Image (cartoon, rainbow, N blue to C red):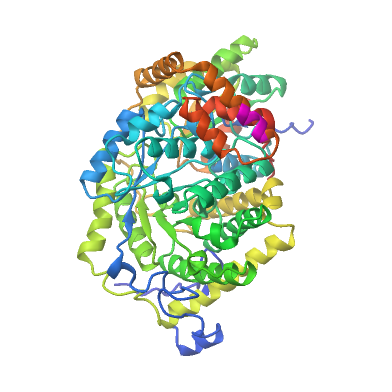
Amino acid sequence: MSERDDDRGVVWDSGLVIEPVYTRRHVEESGGEGRIGAPGEYPYTRGIHPLMYRKRPWTMRQYSGFGSAAETRERFLYLIAHGQTGLNVAFDLPTQCGLDSDDPMAEGEVGRVGMAVDTLADMEEAFEGIDLDRISVSLTINGAAVPIVGMYFAMARKRGYDLSRLRGTAQNDILKELVGRGTWIFPVEPSVKLVGDVMEFCAQHVPRYSPVSVCGYHIRESGATPAQEMAFGLAIACAYLDHAVERGLAVDDVAPGISFNFDIHGNLWEQVAKFRAGRRLWAEIVKERYGANNPRSMQLRMIAGGGGGGLTVQQPLNNAVRGAYYALASALSGTQTMALCSYDEAYTIPSEQAALLSLRTMQILMEETGVCDTVDPLAGSYFVETTTNRMEERIRAEMDRVQAEGGIVRAIAEGRVQAEVNRQAFEHEKKVQAGEIRRVGVNCYVQEEESREIEMHPFREEEARAQVARLARVRKKRDDAAVETRLDVLYRVARDGRNVMPAVMDAVEVYATVGEICDVLREVYGTYVEPIRF
Amino acid sequence: MSAPSAIRVLVAKPGLDGHDVGAKLVCRALMEAGMEVIYTGLRQSPEAIARAAVQESVDVLGLSILSGAHVPLCRAVAERLRGLGAEPGELLWLVGGNVPPGDHESLRELGVRRVFPTGSSFDEIVHFIEKEARP
């Protein structure tokens, strides 16, 4: 063992300076322990359920989907057979961008990074034989949320499920999509209105469904610090709540439907502090600012994990080890749902073997390590309580700054959030390249002759052609006149500023395509123009 | 001797892939190295990219692709460049992103001079451009 005599201090990504030793004095100076509370009680610092994993183990929900609906269904069944308890559906880029598989812009992209969905027929095939009451389904869809969520509901209804009891989640967070990830379609204002349409429709007809999953995740992946990830995420959630309240919805009817998706990579303790602080900040905002009364409105429910930004293309098996630490951080943070990026995910669609290893990683953590034995095991640590208090200050300060500069919607519309996040990504990357931030296999412990034992997910052109042919068959078989009539209704509804969801549901039922529905909406709303700012 | 004008670079995101962190980081690194950088933003058609490269008379064309669709997209860009009377090989054409080693040769055959896979350093990219853009 060698002693470190080059201790230049420890500073977290969010800017917190970390002491070598913490005592009661640090906790007191940072605000004390007065706002920790009990688990399952306001302000939920220690978790949103009184017994947490003793009663409700986290849901395991790997992100998956590729090729056709039939291929995706096979992967779903495989994961379910191995003990996965939820599904997180990946759609291909044409679907996410509201284009049909036969659109010229879809060339080379059909079924490549997710499942191709053109019509209700694809949705029906993907979930055939999967019990939607038993397996909770999360749809990773944003710009095209309206037709895809509409198809999911239509599929469920056709199969005899009662929408008033249907559970599940749609990502449907367009604002973060403008910061990172990029599957936007419409300009900012109508995009937020469409998020609101899904929220309103769910509040009225599908009350157990979570219509929005606000993603700090992709903002962090784009370069934001953990404190900013939480701050921008909460600010975006507030923007959706503001919109819903403006439409006349009651906060207690919509806030319980907002869930969150956060990232885990980097410093383990910083993640824990971020979540404990974020939980109580959200509870306080929803209660104090929005006047909520329902405890469910105040509870920050989340999926945490992923950690794509922490993975490396070098020495890919190391990513499996990183995944295990991220899973631990996620459990210590009190997440409700967990997903891990697979070790090969830095460059390909996960192989069956890699996806299974991620699932096993979470199962080992749950079954063998005792991490579920007691609620919020880190509570009361001088270090954890101090950093929770300090992170809360940072998050609050970031939120106040955004608010003072005109709010998050404007900051995103003008490209200011994007520029700030990218500037930070650049500074971080320079430090990695200079070796100041250490990354195993990248700037230390590098192996010159490394064999990359990664199996690349094959992209099969014939699958894409088959999808195009399938779409042609559906178009031929359907009642075109009915499609046209229902798309006309959709046009009028959108033009008049009414909620488009009922008209979308009617259109998908007669097999209108994702592209046709989005074309109608593009005609009414126009297309987003990206603000480019450095 | 007059000072040489800055190297002009077009950085573009073809296709539907929304991963733009890498493209924007490279833009910043090239700007910091004194180059003149035009960034197209997301979701550009091969046609629009070829047109911009010709109209802006850039020295370097950099495409960032992480979806895996690099071969069909580069084929389309090469065709459009030719359609506009530009030989892909006349530009210093680079590709960055998730490009497995097995595909590098296919891209070179289309006129791509070098692939910088995910994880390439800024220095590597800057030095290569400085050396090759104006031989």
Is A491 on the left or on the right of A73, as rendered?
right
Residue A532's spot in the image, x, y percent?
Answer: 68, 40
The reply to whether the magenta stretch includes residue A491 is: yes
| Residue at the extreme bottom | A25
Residue A111's spot in the image, x, y percent?
Answer: 40, 28
Does the image show residue A264? no
Is A364 on the left or on the right of A177, as rendered?
left
- Name the dominant secondary structure of the magenta segment: helix
Residue A529's spot in the image, x, y percent?
Answer: 68, 35
Q: For this rendering, which residue is in front, B53 or B40?
A: B40
Q: For this rendering, which residue is in front, A76 or B123?
A: A76
Is B17 on the left or on the right of A89, as rendered?
right
Q: For this rendering, which residue is in front, A105 or A453?
A: A105
Residue A496's spot in the image, x, y percent?
Answer: 70, 36
Using the image, determine if residue A231 lies above or below residue A116.
Answer: below
Image quarter where the N terminus of chain A lies is bottom left
The reply to whether the magenta stretch includes residue B104 is: no
The residue under the point 56% across, 19% down is B77
Which segment is the magenta one? A489-494
The residue under the point 25% across, 48% down is A357
Image quarter where the C terminus of chain A lies is top right
Q: How many marks?
A: 0
Does the image show residue A278? yes
